[in-house]
């Protein structure tokens, strides 16, 4: 018997993002759809940034996770439209990012506060960070640098 | 809408993809060499975005061509005369200021072009543009801020930025001169009339250069021959010897 789509979503929610392992690929909002095509499971995935090297790893991780649950025929479909936006990050994902030390994205254009000491006295160091999706900020109170998840 | 000539569409897509490929490679040459770590990372990230966009443009070009070539084939197995990027993006990095100036002058055009392409009658083109434009918005803001910071910086940085602008300005015109391929794209509603982009471009560039205390060079002379493939500068061949070395030395290598 084929697992239900709800079951698949639940399993996908246990596949961690390779760069930010505290959130899942579902939290990240990059899984756009799950459907059975006969006995083949089709998972539609959208890239975060068009050149993000994690995209290939994510597809492989999804295939592996499905195989581990007995689904051998998996097709990953890359879907670029509509383009990914940080609006698709789940509330659960945002809270986990903050706990992990990465300030979640805000439409206002900067972090609400330092994820470590919660001070609002923060400033940008660089518009780009360790991965395409992050910028570098620092806290002027606890003096720690931190990552900010860019809003796009 | 007129049915579009597929050979023209292929050329148009190669132009978009070759611009991002050649500039992406140029910018990646800074990896490990930038003046400070943050700038090194910023340049590498910009290069990554551009290479990602290349995969989409050249992937679609290969599909339209219908000759079983892939985006990798187009990137790695064509020679200089088949590249269709504008001359601006193949110009050498020079110093950091020259790299940033080249980036800004291209980004400002890229943003206007992609914004228009999001309304393309070709759904694939519109989708790639919608994906890319968000990244490019970020590029142009960063490049513009850096042009202002360096132009309105020290005597030395100001002088270097003015020199970079004087050097690169004659390469701006080529991006706005339509040819029969552009005319065919505009007639089919696939791409905008390039001359329509000039107003927004000039307004953005003038605003940034004024804040940077830099003087826009006079004269409208434009170097041409990149996007037509008629005559690239000598720099492109040297770039390709590096970028394509692996596939040329070890054909079909993969990992």
Image (cartoon, coloured by chain):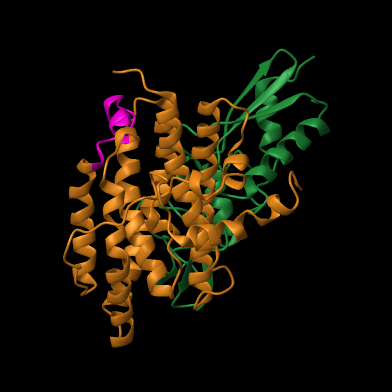
Could you tell me which residue is drawn at 56 percent across and 54 percent down? A97
Q: As rendered, which of B96 and A83 lies closer to the eye?
A: B96
Q: Quadrant of the N terminus of chain A?
A: top right
Q: Which chain is orange?
A: B
Residue B214 image point, x, y percent: 22, 73
Does A128 appear in magenta? no
Please give left or right for residue A85 compared with residue B154 in the image. right
Q: How many marks?
A: 0
Residue B85 image point, x, y percent: 43, 49
Q: Which chain is green?
A: A
Question: Residue farthest to the front?
Answer: B230
Q: Which residues are magenta?
A: B182-194
Q: Is residue B26 above or below residue A63?
A: below
Could you tell me which residue is drawn at 31 percent across and 35 percent down? B182
Residue A151: tell me if it is visible.
Answer: yes
Could you tell me which residue is drawn at 70 percent across and 54 percent down? B246
Does B183 appear in magenta? yes
Please give left or right for residue A108 compared with residue B38 in the image. left
Residue B63 image point, x, y percent: 55, 28
Residue A50: tell me if it is visible.
Answer: no
Residue B240 image point, x, y percent: 57, 56
Q: Is residue A32 above or below residue B150?
A: above
Please give left or right for residue B136 compared with residue B62 in the image. left
Q: Is residue A37 above or below residue B171?
A: above
């Amino acid at each position: 018997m084929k697992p239900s789509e709800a079951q698949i979503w639940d399993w996908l929610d246990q596949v961690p993002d390779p760069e930010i392992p505290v959130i899942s690929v579902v939290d990240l909002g990059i899984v756009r759809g799950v459907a059975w095509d006969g006995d083949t499971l089709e998972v539609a995935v959208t890239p975060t940034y068009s050149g993000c090297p994690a995209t290939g790893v994510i597809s492989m991780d999804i295939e592996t996770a499905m195989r581990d649950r007995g689904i051998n025929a998996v097709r990953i479909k890359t879907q670029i439209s509509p383009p990914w936006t940080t609006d698709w990050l789940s509330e659960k994902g945002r809270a986990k990012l903050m706990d992990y030390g990465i300030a979640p994205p805000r439409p206002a254009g900067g972090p609400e506060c330092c994820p470590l000491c919660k001070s609002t006295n923060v400033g940008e160091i660089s518009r780009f960070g360790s991965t395409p999706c992050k910028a570098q900020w620092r806290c002027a109170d606890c003096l720690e640098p931190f990552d900010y998840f860019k809003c796009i | 809408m007129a049915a579009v000539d597929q050979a023209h569409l292929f050329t148009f897509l190669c132009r978009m993809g070759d611009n991002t490929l050649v500039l992406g490679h140029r910018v990646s040459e800074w990896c490990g060499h930038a003046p400070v770590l943050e700038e090194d990372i910023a340049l590498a990230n910009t290069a990554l975005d551009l290479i990602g966009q290349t995969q989409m443009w050249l992937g679609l070009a290969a599909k339209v061509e219908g000759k079983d070539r892939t985006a990798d084939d187009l990137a790695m197995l064509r020679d200089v005369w088949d590249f269709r990027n504008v001359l601006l993006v193949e110009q050498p990095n020079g110093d950091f200021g020259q790299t940033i100036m080249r980036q800004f002058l291209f980004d400002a055009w890229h943003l206007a072009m992609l914004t228009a392409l999001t309304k393309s009658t070709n759904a694939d083109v519109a989708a790639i543009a919608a994906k890319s434009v968000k990244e490019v918005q970020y590029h142009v803001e960063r490049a513009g801020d850096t042009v202002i910071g360096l132009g309105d910086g020290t005597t030395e940085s100001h002088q270097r930025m003015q020199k970079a602008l004087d050097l690169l300005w004659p390469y701006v015109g080529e991006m706005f001169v339509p040819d029969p391929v552009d005319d065919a794209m505009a007639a089919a509603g696939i791409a905008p009339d390039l001359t329509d982009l000039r107003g927004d471009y000039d307004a953005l560039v003038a605003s940034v250069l004024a804040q940077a205390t830099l003087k826009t060079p006079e004269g409208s002379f434009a170097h041409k021959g990149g996007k037509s493939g008629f005559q690239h500068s000598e720099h492109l061949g040297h770039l390709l010897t590096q970028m394509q070395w692996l596939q040329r030395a070890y054909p079909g290598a993969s990992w």
